[in-house]
Amino acid sequence: MKTVAYFAFSFLLLFNPLLLSQEFLPDTVVFGSDSNYPPFEFLNQHGEPAGFHVDLIRAIAEEMGFEVSIKLGVWADIKKELEVTGSVHISDMFYTKARDKTVEYAIPHDAMFDNIYIRKGEEGIFGIKDLAGKKVAVQLSSTLEEYLVSNYPAIQTIPVQTEPGALELLSKGGCDAALVSNIISDEIIPKLKLNNLVRVGQTVIPREIAFVVKEGNYSLLRTLNIGMVRMIESGKLNELKSKWLKQKSTTWFTTKVIILISIVLILILMILIWNLVLRITVKEKTKELEFANNRLNLISGHITSRIDKASTKEQTIELLNLVKETFNVDMCDIRIVIKDELKLMGSVGSRPDGLPESLPVSHGLYKNIFKKKSAIIHKGDHLLRLLRQSDGKGPSDYNVKFFAGAPLMVEDHISGILEIYSEKEMEKLAELDLKHLQIVADKIGMALENVRLFEQNEKQKEILVRQIVAKKQAEGEIKKLNDELEQRVLERTAQLENTNKELESFSYSVSHDLRAPLRAISGFAEIIIRRHQADLNEEGQRYFKNIVQAGERMGQLIDDLLTYSRLGRAGVKREQIKLGDLIKEIAGRMESTINKNHGALVIAEGLPAIMGDRTLLSQIFINLLDNAIKYHRPDVPPQVAVDFSLEDHHVIISVKDRGIGIPVEYQQKIFDIFQRLHPEDEYPGTGVGLSTVKKAAELLGGKIWIESQVGHGSTFFVKLPKD
């Protein structure tokens, strides 16, 4: 069972990068927790900290080589100190989504659940739903209290300082029930001789427990995770559990881990499916746009060009083929009005030879066309009845299921009919599609009329002039339709952009949620290198070292992306910031890097104070100073100068270096995310830093720009409002 659990633990953490940070471990790490939560942590008879978690953190500290101080007290106060002041660096805590926003969770090391207790002889309570309207004692600021308040508002919760206190209150009749964790109750009830209490119902909200650190303290989190892995590997964790914990939930925990793994795999599958659906949707939309574009090309083409007597039939067939393809139908023909008959002038399609050469104008298909003088459609059984009128004349031997006809308008009279047929089911043409068909018919009508104009020569000049006017009007309508199509393209493009943004947000959410199971890649690789180095050849050792380095780079990239996305999320909190003190503080943290590169950093005196957000300003100058030091020429030590100037109600801070410089064509692109000009092995980085600087400056109401010359260094200018 131990092997199964360890394997599940390893799989859960397979993609977990060991995030690096600029923070360093303090001289003494303070462990804070509940002073009355046996057997996990409590004050023994001598008033000294004792318990499973106390021994575990001391063992990790000894393994990882740091000092630890134990601070036990009221749980609500310890929790507040961790989340607000941060003076307590570590605490053991159950996982919730709300808490995950303010703290970072280490590798879980145990799992627990809660039980419902009532007094013997009480009736009517068999599960958590039966507690509605009852007074229930729970520990103050615990995950259980948060769970009941959010999901069972009808329960009257009575917060108490400790879980033993909740059982004592129930025993004395101060409430109707108490909810406490299983291991606590198993030890406290016999110890306090609370013999009038009995457990009822099923267990409540099973959950994992882990050490946590203040959000962003990745150095300490990394140390804890490596220490925990070593505790698991050495068997020390099981040894401490055997010493302090009488009951273990290994089977439940293994099942829980498998469920979590399944959820992760399902999420990955959902991402792949979503990408596939998005691609199909884009392909379909693109096909629709191409179809509409082809139709407009047909409309705006030279249909109205002169058709000679020698080429009228040939050009008519060419136009019909184009119409058939554009409207995606099986058959297309043109009929010309001669007296009271519609004579077939040309046809293309599946069986055009079966069409009658002449049909009366009064035929059922054409009545509405001549009446409305606009395009119409027929479909279904109604169409079949129309096709069988007029003594059986018409394409009655066809299995026609769709028909659309448009009059060939010449001025205000109909010179003929443009017909399209389909032998398959088709959706009803939209209003815009009918307009397109009518415009095509109008142009064909004008083209045929041109033939008559050429035959009549000078006698028909006046009619020709009116046709030119009609053509211009048609071109105006075409332009209007083109504008409408362009608007539709813009709207669909906006829809696709919104879809991409939703996918980006979803990917970010998944990336953020996968941080916890991604933190052990480098840790396990380091363990393999350390313990099995003798079993690995030189190539194998190099592969595992590459895993560690790749995990660290991935971790830095995810960390930078999360930092970038979080900028401004909590709003800009303005306060009086002394720029000189802030930049000197940041420079102090970089002193070792500057000395390592034999560099120098000069900060001008008299930097003013401004109203700004400390977090955003720190991100600006951390990234600018780090880049100025990092991108120095190999033969020239980094020399960085920070200066300032005042302009109206703004201050302009400059960070100047003697580095490699940036070509002019890239000086605007470097502020875009993931834009890098140099290989990773030459100048390491993620391509997010300057994007973060730009975003932070804009959130403060300022801007950033650069002046640079290749081989002579760069100067970054940040303009910020003083008030």
Image (cartoon, rainbow, N blue to C red):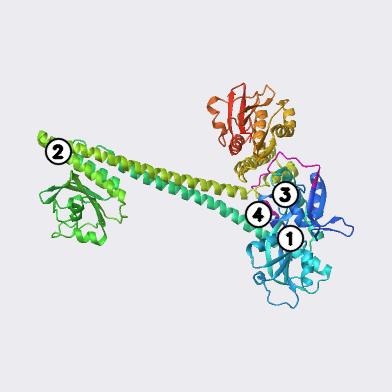
Going from N to C along the chain, the mark reached first, 2 or 4, is: 4
State if disc 1 and disc 2 touch (CB < 8 Å). Answer: no
Q: Is residue 117 left or right of residue 716?
A: right
Tell me the residue at 67%/45% (across/down).
521
Measured Cα–Cα span from mark 2 to mark 1: 94 Å
Residue 683 belongs to magenta span: no
Between the C-alphas of marks 3 and 4, the distance is 14 Å
Q: Mark 3 falls on what kind of element?
A: helix
How far is mark 2 from mark 4, CA to CA?
Answer: 79 Å
Query: Whole-percent x and y of residue 577?
Result: 69, 36
Residue designated by label 4: 98
Secondary structure under tag 4 reads loop
Query: Who comes first in sequence, dot 2 or dot 1?
Result: 1
Residue type at tag 3 = Val
Which residue was labeled with disc 2?
463
The residue tagged 3 is: 84
Q: Nearer the viewer, residue 456 or 648?
A: 648
Front residue of 375/365: it is 375
Q: Secondary structure at mark 2?
A: helix
Horizontal and vertical percent for residue 302?
25, 37
Marks 1 and 3, the one that precedes in the sequence: 3
Q: Nearer the viewer, mark 3 or mark 4?
A: 3
- Of discs 2 and 4, which sits in the foreground? 2
The secondary structure that dominates the magenta segment is: loop
